[in-house]
Image (tube, rainbow, N blue to C red):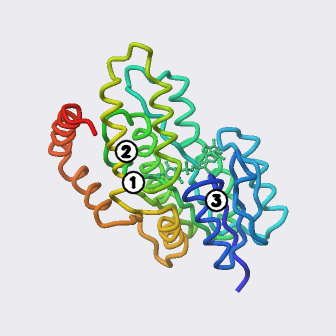
Amino acid sequence: MTQRTVLITGASSGMGAAAARLFAARGWRVYGGARRETLIPTAPNITALHLDVTVHSDNVRFVSQVMTDQPRIDVLINNAGYGEFGPLEEVPLSAVHQQLATNLLGAADLTQLVIPIMRRQRSGRIVNISSIAGDIYTPLGGWYYVSKHALNVWSDTLDVELRQFGLRSVVVAPGDTASSWSAIALQHAAANLTTDSPYRGLLTAMQGVLTTGERVSGATSADLATVFYRAATAPHPRRRYYHSPLDQFLTHVARAHPTLYHQAMVAGTRFIMRHPH
Ligand SMILES: NC(=O)c1ccc[n+]([C@@H]2O[C@H](COP(=O)([O-])OP(=O)(O)OC[C@H]3O[C@@H](n4cnc5c(N)ncnc54)[C@H](OP(=O)(O)O)[C@@H]3O)[C@@H](O)[C@H]2O)c1
């Protein structure tokens, strides 16, 4: 069998770095992209490239470099992402643009570049790293949730359009997973608060929730990389991939019982504000 090629965005940290290691260990030719490309894992079959997914010329260069070296692209993993946390009253719209440019439009841009190549091959798969936050929400993550909800419906629509060509677009929805993600989301939340913000108490309460979530779930980036691998290689892929039954259950409750979920969020937020960690 010829060596398969995968492109992974956000390969310098967390799940993207773990996925680069896993695909390389399983014999794939890996092209990893990130702004901090020197942090991308090194191996003979990993090529690390500078990539800011919000910059169109970077995306063009990334895909052209792969096509100069390789006869085909089997899988694109749109993994680059971060949480632009903060209260919706205060997050500056310039930061919102950056959030959507990274988590949604960067994936869309790269995908538009890769689809014509995959269509000519009559095979290929787009794996979009969304989140359980594509179905659920908590306070202070509003724009992140918007980006992941949008990524889900974008992926589903794309999947319907691509099936006629033998291509698929699927979603991996991680829950709390150990990586740099929560520290970066909290940094953004703190930076997005105004000096006399009335949301300081809520942020203090949510800090505890975000850091406890990671500890309780126990999921590592390496665990999630195995889910990425399943989503990339399953002969008949599903629309959604989860790491744990709890992640899947939470998204099911939020979709099937939206009012109940909303009431639980309101009550839960009142509770954590009265009993901060
Ligand atoms: N960890 C969680 O609990 C969790 C849960 C659900 C979903 N997710 C999602 O899973 C994906 C991976 O996150 P992670 O947990 O592995 O977080 P992470 O450790 O912070 O890694 C994020 C990666 O995204 C890259 N990135 C960010 N902005 C970029 C840009 N403009 N261009 C290119 N690369 C960019 C970063 O690389 P550079 O900074 O070097 O560019 C880094 O490699 C994200 O989409 C995240 O939203 C995470």
Q: CA distance from mark 3 to mark 1?
A: 23 Å
**Residue 137, position in %: x, y?**
32, 42
Query: Where does label 3 land, which residue?
Result: 8
Instruction: Assign a secondary structure to mark 1.
Output: helix
User: Looking at the image, which is closer to me, 143 or 87?
Assistant: 87
Q: Is mark 1 within 8 Å of ligand 1?
A: yes
**Residue 126, position in %: x, y?**
56, 61
Instruction: Assign a secondary structure to mark 2.
Output: helix
Q: Are marks 3 and 2 in contact (CB under 8 Å)?
A: no
Q: Is residue 144 above or below residue 113?
A: above
Residue at x 35% of width, y 60% of height: 217
Instruction: Assign a secondary structure to mark 3.
Output: strand
Query: Where does label 2 land, which residue?
Result: 210
Mark 1 residue type: Glu
**Residue 162, position in %: x, y?**
54, 61
Mark 2 residue type: Leu
Q: Earlier in the sequence, mark 3 or mark 2?
A: 3
Q: Is mark 2 within 8 Å of ligand 1?
A: no
User: Looking at the image, which is closer to me, 178 or 165?
Assistant: 178
Q: CA distance from mark 3 to mark 2?
A: 26 Å
| Label 3 vs label 1, nearer the camera | 1
**Residue 248, position in %: x, y?**
31, 61
Residue at x 50% of width, y 71% of height: 226
Q: Is mark 3 within 8 Å of ligand 1?
A: no
Q: Are marks 1 and 2 in contact (CB under 8 Å)?
A: yes
Mark 3 residue type: Ile
Q: How many marks?
A: 3
